[in-house]
Image (spheres, rainbow, N blue to C red):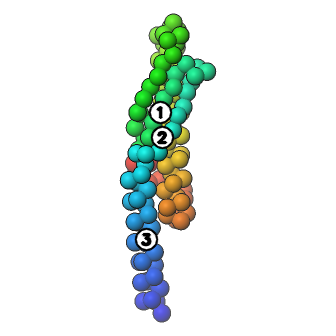
Amino acid sequence: MFKGNMSKLLKQAQEVQKNIEAVQNELSDLIVDADSGGGMIQVKANGKQEILEINIDPEALDEEKEMLEDLIISAVNKALSKAQEESQEKMNAAAGGMVSGIKIPGM
């Protein structure tokens, strides 16, 4: 009986691994948007937590240098956080909740 359960568990683990690999391959297609300064700074990132695009409203260039830097940092951090959160949700779903609360490397 133990042998049968172990075989079943191994099969489930292999299926979970396949699902996770499939989601990891799809993460570059997951795009999130974030902004700061009332939309003066807009950032797009993908599910692999790579910044794809930064748009700066021309009016933002009238701000002080330090303020503009803070707005960019804020928007980038929001985008990366959002990407991480959505990626983790997709990974948890792929693993059937088995990785809930576990940080997956690179996520």
Residue 31 circle label:
2
The x and y percentages for residue 21 are 39, 59
Q: Is residue 61 above or below residue 43?
A: above
Q: Amino acid at mark 1?
A: Lys
Q: Amino acid at mark 3?
A: Glu
Q: Residue at x 42, y 89 (%)?
A: 3
How far is the residue under mark 1 from the one under mark 2? 7 Å
Q: Amino acid at mark 2?
A: Ile
Q: Is residue 107 visible?
A: yes
Q: Which residue is mark 1?
A: 44
Q: Which residue is mark 3?
A: 15
Residue toward you, 24 or 100: 24
Counting other residues with Cα less than 10 Å from the Cα at mark 2, is it few (<14), some (14-19), or many (20 or more)? some
Q: Is residue 70 visible?
A: no
Q: Is residue 80 above or below residue 14?
A: above
Marked residue nearer the N-terminal end (2 or 3)? 3
Residue toward you, 91 or 26: 26
The x and y percentages for residue 44 are 47, 33
Residue at the bottom extreme of this rendering: 1
The x and y percentages for residue 10 are 41, 77
Q: Residue at x 46, y 78 (%)?
A: 9
Q: Is residue 67 above or below residue 86?
A: above
Residue toward you, 42 or 76: 42
How far is the residue under mark 2 from the one under mark 3? 26 Å
Counting other residues with Cα less than 10 Å from the Cα at mark 1, is it few (<14), some (14-19), or many (20 or more)? many
